[in-house]
Image (cartoon, rainbow, N blue to C red):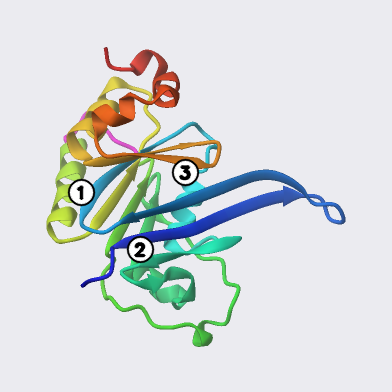
Amino acid sequence: MAAPLLAVEGLRKEYARGVLRRTPTFSLAADFTIAEPAIVGVMGPNGSGKTTLFELITGSNVPTAGRVLCCGQDIHRVRYRERDRLAIHYHQSYQVRSFKRTVPSFLLQPAGADYPMLHLFDEPQFNTQDGYIGFMLDFFRKLRREGRLVILCLHPTEAFHLDILRETCERFIFVHRGRLALAANWDEMLRQEAVRSYLGALTPA
């Protein structure tokens, strides 16, 4: 049986301030599995931990505890320059995130793939004027047809952002104060009070 495309196991990231007396400022906890190709929508308030989650999944941020398995490989034990062969993080204007190096690369294992199986899009900029949205959505669907996992994070400011999520994504993750709530479909996600409060006036009737 093939390994799940993504397995996030007991993942935790904690931030603190201070030198002698460390005071926690933020923590993120996640534990979930996505076994097969899909397009997954992610939402949540600013500062809730969405980008931190993406960085941990793609190996550019070091977890406090837990691990992330991409196609069965622990992303944080893969050579830095090869991690984007497993999972790649496109941040906003589609620039790729860099990696924080903590262990010499020669001590790490090679990636078991030549082309990323996980594609994470972090609040991409959609232009409504030139057909760019259609191009990108077709690209997301093409990746899924090729057996890859697409995770699309949006911070909705317009109604069409919700249309993109509803029409494109098959399942959803809502991140709030460092905790994740998973939903199997759009309607299930909207039944969560925290989601409706977050969307405010954009909440569908």
Residue on which the image places disc 1? 140
Residue sitting at the far bottom: 106
Q: Quadrant of the N terminus?
A: bottom left
| Residue at horizontal 23 percent and vertical 40 percent from the top | 169
Q: Which amino acid, mark 3?
A: Lys
Residue 110 colored in magenta in the image: no
| Image mark for residue 20 | none
**Figure check: 27 above or below 148:** above
Whether residue 131 is in magenta: the answer is yes
Determine the secondary structure under disc 3.
helix
Q: Residues within 10 Å of mark 1 (few under 14, many from 20)?
A: many
Tell me the residue that label 3 is attached to: 50
- The residue that disc 2 covers is 87
Q: Residues within 10 Å of mark 3 (few under 14, many from 20)?
A: many
Q: Position of residue 111 (x, y in %)?
A: 35, 78
Are the residues at dot 3 and dot 1 in contact (C-beta closer than 8 Å)? Answer: no
Corner quadrant of residue 87: bottom left
Q: Amino acid at mark 1?
A: Phe
Labels 2 and 3: the sequence-earlier one:
3
The magenta region covers 125-132
